[in-house]
């Protein structure tokens, strides 16, 4: 019997043991911007404001992407995967997505044991 999360039209995220789901953010063209985690509060804040909010595991608090830099992610569309344990945020970024100033947090390619900047 299929999991009701796979067939239902109701949003019912499958939170992990820490109360989080993985959230992948891309731009409208599909370029990967960042991966973070959301708790229930972050999901609610994102839905209410239209701007991405996440749970910072390092800071142990809710944070709005761009709260200090101004480089917010305006969420155009939000999708959830088949078993509702990962979110996809399709965004219009207002500046670089990475705190380093790179357009994406994925600005390096793995080459063996080396990291090579991606153009």
Image: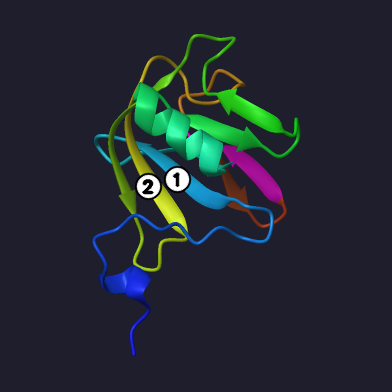
Q: Residue shown at 49%/9% (left/top)? A: 70
Instruction: Say the numbered circle drawn on residue 92.
Output: none
Q: Residue shown at 34%/67% (left/top)? A: 82
Left or right relative to 108: residue 56 = right
Picture quadrant where residue 60 is located? top right
- Crowdedness near tag 1: few (<14), some (14–19) or many (≥20) residues, C-alpha within 10 Å: some
Asked if the residues shown at circle 1 and circle 2 are in contact, with their CB atoms under 8 angstroms apart, the answer is yes
**Front one among 78 and 95:** 78
Q: Is residue 79 visible?
A: yes
Q: Is residue 40 above or below residue 11?
A: above
Which residues make up the magenta segment?
Answer: 114-119
Q: CA distance from mark 1 to mark 2?
A: 5 Å
Give coordinates of residue 85: x percent, y percent: 47, 60
Q: Which residue is mark 1?
A: 24
Give the SS element for disc 2: strand
- Crowdedness near tag 2: few (<14), some (14–19) or many (≥20) residues, C-alpha within 10 Å: some
Q: Is residue 70 above or below residue 19?
A: above
Q: Is residue 71 above or below residue 26?
A: above
Picture quadrant where residue 89 is located? top left
Q: Which residue is mark 2?
A: 88
Give the SS element for disc 1: strand
Give coordinates of residue 87: x percent, y percent: 41, 50
Q: Residue shown at 27%/67% (left/top)? A: 8
């Amino acid at each position: 019997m299929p999991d009701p999360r796979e067939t239902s039209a109701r949003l019912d995220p499958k939170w992990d043991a820490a109360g989080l789901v993985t959230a992948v953010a891309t731009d409208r063209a599909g370029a990967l911007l960042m991966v973070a985690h959301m708790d229930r509060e972050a999901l609610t804040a994102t839905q209410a404001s239209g701007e991405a909010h996440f749970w910072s595991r390092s800071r142990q608090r809710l944070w709005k992407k761009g709260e200090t830099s101004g480089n917010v992610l305006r969420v155009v569309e939000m999708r959830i995967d088949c078993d509702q344990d990962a979110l996809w945020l399709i965004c219009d970024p207002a500046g670089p997505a990475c705190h380093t100033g790179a357009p994406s947090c994925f600005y390096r390619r793995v080459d063996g044991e080396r990291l090579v900047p991606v153009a």
